[in-house]
Image (cartoon, rainbow, N blue to C red):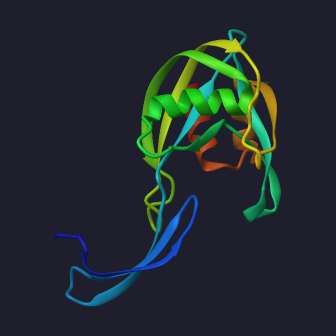
């Protein structure tokens, strides 16, 4: 059975700094029409950075949409034309103050494919050099070092609730 949906019409609803929103009319496999709301995102990276002591570099920040602070892996969106590996190095340094001399691509995944096309590239960072944290002017993050085993425990206890961080931490732990 062919499960693909054929796009009949696209209507742009919102154009923003980070996302765009559109509503598409599609033809379903059974010939009927349906509406699909789509959030367009340029893609992003997340970084698993472990110190030689096997401490994971995390960031604590307030997430306005959910109204709470979260503990997350360093991450950020791709700039136009930017390679994911370059973005991973840049975001790690901006958010944590650590520069990775080595990065290794671990994999990629869609964050919420039911309504959003955001793809997340996951990297492991090694050979870290401590430098200066350089957050964006509207970004306030606190760097937290946590042993990998404790980060895994926080995933399973529900203290770490961010999807990309759960994926990255469990991937790093081989779970």
- Please tell me which residue is depicted at 73% across the width and 28% down the height of the picture: 96
Task: Tell me where residue 81 sits by quadrant.
Answer: top left
- Please tell me which residue is depicted at 46% across the width and 29% down the height of the picture: 85
Q: Against 104, is 76 above or below?
A: below
- Mark yes or no: residue 24 visible: yes
Which quadrant is the N terminus positioned in?
bottom left
Instruction: Give x and y (percent) for residue 118.
Output: 47, 55
Q: Against 83, is 147 above or below?
A: above
Which quadrant is the C terminus positioned in?
top right
Q: Against 87, is 7 above or below?
A: below
Of all residues shown, which one is farthest toward the left? 1
In this image, 20 relative to 142: left or right? Answer: left
Instruction: Give x and y (percent) for residue 69.
Output: 82, 51
Instruction: Give x and y (percent) for residue 70.
Output: 77, 48
Instruction: Give x and y (percent) for residue 80.
Output: 45, 46
Q: Nearer the viewer, residue 105 or 85?
A: 85
- Please tell me which residue is depicted at 45% across the width and 35% down the height of the picture: 84
- Mark yes or no: residue 175 visible: no
């Amino acid at each position: 059975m062919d499960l693909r949906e054929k796009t009949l019409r696209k209507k742009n609803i919102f154009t923003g700094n980070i996302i765009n929103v559109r509503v598409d009319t599609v033809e379903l496999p059974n010939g009927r029409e349906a509406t699909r709301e789509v959030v367009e995102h340029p893609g992003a990276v997340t970084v698993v950075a472990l110190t030689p002591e096997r401490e994971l570099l995390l960031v604590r920040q307030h997430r306005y949409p959910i109204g709470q602070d979260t503990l997350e892996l360093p991450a950020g969106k791709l700039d136009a034309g930017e390679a994911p590996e370059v973005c991973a190095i840049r975001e790690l340094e901006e958010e944590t103050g650590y520069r990775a001399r080595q990065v290794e691509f671990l994999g990629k995944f869609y964050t919420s494919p039911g309504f959003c096309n955001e793809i997340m590239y996951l990297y492991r960072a090694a050979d870290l050099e401590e430098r200066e944290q350089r957050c964006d002017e509207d970004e306030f993050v606190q760097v937290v070092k946590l042993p990998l085993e404790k980060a895994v425990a926080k995933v399973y206890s529900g203290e770490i609730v961010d999807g990309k961080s759960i994926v990255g931490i469990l991937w790093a732990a081989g779970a």
